[in-house]
Image: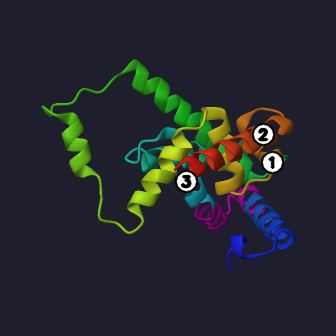
């Protein structure tokens, strides 16, 4: 049973217990337990990929950014003390990895050797997948949100982070996260009504 199929109180307890386990794995990995490293990475790999996918907007960079996130995290694991959940700690590293990738790209723009790069991109996109149009519509709706609201919405509503951890990842007060999520919901609802 997924957390979304559970009643809210059960889902919170389930998520909290999972976060406790993930944090315990991170602490064990810090102590040199290789099995704990695998469990830690396996438990959070999908969340990291989803988070960086929404932050960077480049589907082809997601795997590289997720890998960079885990490389940074594993290299810094000796500094993780468990004061916050390992999930929040790792997602804040992912956020910095995406920001660094933007800085790198801005400093070193890539050139295209294709005469019509827009056509090449369009042809490379999968378009016969089930739900593809819905996925594009959802991405467009999320993309229409201001960056800070989109980040708060994705962290809390898609990745299921508690507001306190989303505030930690976003480096802002918890009230600000709540406000951003409420405004994002309102904006998305207005957009859906307009469709």
User: Does the magenta-highlighted stretch encompass residue 33?
Assistant: yes
The kind of secondary structure element at disc 3 is helix
Chosen colour scheme: rainbow
At 51% from the left edge and 50% from the top edge, which residue is drawn? 195
At 58% from the left edge and 42% from the top edge, which residue is drawn? 72
Lower sequence index among marks 1 and 3: 3
Residue contact between numbered discs 2 and 1, judged by CB atoms under 8 Å: yes
Q: Which mark is residue 49?
A: none
Q: Which mark is residue 50?
A: 3
- Between disc 2 and disc 3, the foreground one is 2
Q: Nearer the viewer, residue 112 or 97?
A: 112
Mark 3 neighbour class, 10 Å CA radius: few under 14, some 14 to 19, many 20 or more: some
Lower sequence index among marks 2 and 1: 1
The kind of secondary structure element at disc 1 is helix
**Which region of the structure is painted magenta?**
24-43
Mark 2 neighbour class, 10 Å CA radius: few under 14, some 14 to 19, many 20 or more: many
Q: CA distance from mark 2 to mark 1?
A: 7 Å
Q: CA distance from mark 2 to mark 3?
A: 19 Å
Q: Nearer the viewer, residue 23 or 104?
A: 104
Q: Is residue 71 visible?
A: no
Whole-percent x and y of residue 148?
66, 34
Q: Is residue 172 left or right of residue 62?
A: right
Q: Which mark is residue 163?
A: 1
Q: Is residue 66 left or right of residue 161?
A: left
Is 185 located above or below residue 96 in the figure? Answer: below
């Amino acid at each position: 049973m997924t957390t979304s199929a559970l009643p809210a109180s059960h889902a919170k307890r389930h998520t909290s217990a999972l976060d406790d386990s993930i944090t315990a794995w991170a602490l064990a990995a810090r102590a040199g337990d290789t099995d704990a490293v695998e469990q830690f990475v396996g438990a959070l790999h999908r969340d990291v990929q989803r988070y960086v996918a929404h932050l960077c907007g480049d589907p082809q960079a997601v795997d590289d950014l997720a890998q960079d996130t885990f490389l940074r995290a594993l290299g810094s694991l000796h500094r993780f003390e468990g004061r916050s959940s390992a999930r929040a700690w790792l997602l804040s590293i992912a956020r910095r990895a995406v920001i660094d990738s933007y800085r790198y790209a801005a400093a070193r723009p890539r050139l295209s050797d294709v005469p019509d790069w827009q056509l090449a991109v369009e042809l490379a996109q999968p378009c016969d997948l089930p739900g593809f149009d819905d996925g594009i519509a959802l991405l467009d709706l999320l993309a229409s949100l201001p960056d800070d609201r989109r980040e708060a919405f994705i962290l809390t509503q898609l990745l299921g982070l508690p507001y306190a951890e989303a505030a930690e990842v976003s480096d802002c007060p918890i009230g600000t996260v709540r406000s951003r999520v409420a405004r994002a919901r309102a904006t998305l609802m207005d957009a859906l009504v307009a469709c």
